[in-house]
Amino acid sequence: MFEDFTLTSFAPAKRYTNGQLESQSNLVLRNKQLVSFVESISQMVLILNKYRQVIYANKSYKDFCKTFNEEPIIGKKPGETFNCRNAFKSVNGCGGSKVCQSCGAYQAISESHKGTKATKECQVLTVDNDAIDLNVTATPLELEGEKLTIFSIIDIRDEKRRKSLERVFIHDILNSAGAISGLSAILKEIDDPKEMFDIAETIESAAGSLIDEIKAQREFASAERGDLQAKFFEVDSMFILKDIQKMYVNHELNFGKQIKIHPEAEYTNVNTDRVLLNRILGNMIKNAIESNSPNDEITLNCKKRNESVQFSVHNKSVISQNIQDELFKRFYSTKGAGRGVGTYSMKLLGEKYLKGKVWFTSTPDEGTTFYIQL
């Protein structure tokens, strides 16, 4: 039986009516050879009309979407079927917001409308902070005068995650291990007890960073699998701020940037997982440390907001608009391939596991502030 044609209320523009959609879908269903083919392959397949609306979805794609959205697929555009957060930024839905122009799926479908088969990679972040990496192919199709698109999708999350995490993990581990190795070699050449003690302390700190990186990678992998267990306890907000300030003021990444606590930061208790909150605030601080503003000052703050507690990390640099649009995607980074876990994990840990809200503001007048509200 044909699916329910109830359309989404947020996307009234450039869409066929329910009756037109049913007619187009029946056009596909009558082509038994086409239906048999798309149902026989392991790839996920959609057939789209000229407005990018789904008029047919094979079982593989329906099964894929069930984990994100239980609503009917027919009549929606691809991003709406798996709850891409950008699909809800415009009244036109998927493809209607400015950031959609850089989406691989949007680009591939656009090329198919010009009569060209196109294959692209597509990375999306859902409204529930699930990151999806897809390889998509859009192929033009004409049936009885209707210009359609066969849109095939391969889920490449596991492959991308493995490769990127390997690069990130190896990069960070080598940095810490290299520092320990170099300092250990120097230690053998020194006779002065005080200098030996200072270097030993630095080695201890580098070893601590190495352990911390291993723990961070373990937490992140567990969070992505969905089996991370948050442990909630009452924690003093100022204890959190002072602890994270102490941790990063002399961090190996920090070359002289001041980290201070705002004089009006408020003392309050918050029920949260302290380790995960420290990880999120630490990533916010690292982001500020690695900004291109020399002699910058990083300010930590905490405010009570009715029944919530809001932590923030501010610095004077500004993030360009094109970077702002992509910042919370997994492995998106301006620092090279395989980086960018930190900003994505802020959202993943803060919203999915701490049940809070994570966002940022960035303007030339106010600088950049990252927030987490719990």
Image: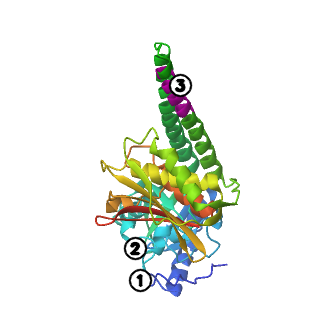
- Binning the other alpha carbons within 10 Å of mark 3 as few (below 14), some (14 to 19) or many (20 upward) gives some
Q: Is residue 203 above or below residue 104?
A: above
Residue at point 63% right, 65% down?
270
Which tag is nearer the camera, tag 2 or tag 1?
A: 2
163 or 71, nearer to the observer: 163
Q: Main secondary structure of the magenta part?
A: helix
Asked if one can make out residue 43 in the rendered structure from this viewpoint, the answer is no
Say few, some or many: other residues with alpha carbon within 10 Å of mark 1 (under 14 / 14 to 19 / 20 or more): few
Earlier in the chain: of badge 3 and badge 2, it is 2
Between 300 and 207, the one lying in front of the other is 300
- Magenta stretch holds residue 197: yes
Where is residue 134? Give x, y as percent.
51, 55
> Foreground: 365 or 301?
301
Checking the image for residue 96, the label placed there is 2
| Residues at discs 2 and 1 in contact (Cβ within 8 Å) | yes
- Magenta segment boundaries in residue numbering: 195-207
Placement of the N terminus among the 4 image quadrants: bottom right
Q: Residue at x 52, y 45 (%)?
A: 247
The C terminus - image quarter: bottom right
- The residue identified by callout 1 is 13
Which numbered disc, 3 or 1, marks the residue that appears first in the sequence?
1
Disc 1 element: loop
For disc 2, the neighbor class at 10 Å (few under 14, some 14 to 19, many from 20) is: some
Any part of residue 196 in sight: yes
Q: Quadrant location of residue 12? A: bottom left
Q: Disc 1 marks which amino acid? A: Ala
The residue beneath circle 3 is 200
